[in-house]
Image (tube, helix red, strand yellow):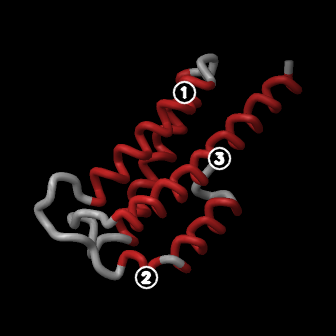
Amino acid sequence: MVVESEGYHALIEHFTEHLALFEKGGEEGGQECIEDVVMDMIASNLMVVFQQNPDLDADFRFKLMQEADNVMEDLSEVLSSVWTCCPTNEQIAFLEDYISLVKNLFDSAIAERLAQNYVTR
């Protein structure tokens, strides 16, 4: 659905073009590591998606959660060398933008699903 879409693959390309931002992380052992920041951002964006679409059926919600887990896994693979480091402000800003773009893909998938349901009724 989302992680198999052309849009997601374009976002991955966008991420790799900015990978130099993550060549080094902040210090290890700080209060929040990149993993925590990414997890919080993905979770809060997913919660917003669900709040904006309260009528989604449980099966579709579960699929969206699986997709969010896949996004998290992809980011953990790409950022494995700095995953446990504290993020810099620049890294946080990039991750916020990136994850908001991923949220847009979720919004599009929901709109497509709702349009399909509307047509079949």
Circle 2 residues within 10 Å: few <14, some 14–19, many ≥20: few
87 vs 48, left or right, is left
Residue at the image point whose x is 53% and y is 59% from the top? 98
Q: Which of marks 2 and 3 is nearer the N terminus?
A: 2
Q: Are marks 1 and 2 in contact (CB under 8 Å)?
A: no
User: Badge 3 is on which residue?
Assistant: 104
- Picture layout, residue 40 above or below residue 31: above
Looking at the image, is mark 3 or mark 1 earlier in the sequence?
A: 1
Image height check: is 16 above or below 43?
below
What's under tag 1, amino acid-wise?
Phe
Q: Where is residue 49 in the image (x, y as percent from the top left)?
A: 57, 32
Mark-to-mark CA distance, 2 and 3: 24 Å
Which mark identifies residue 20?
A: 2
Viewer-proximal residue, 63 or 28?
A: 28
Residue at horizontal 58%, vertical 46%? 103
Instruction: Give the number of marks.
Output: 3
Query: What secondary structure is found at the residue carrying circle 2?
Result: helix
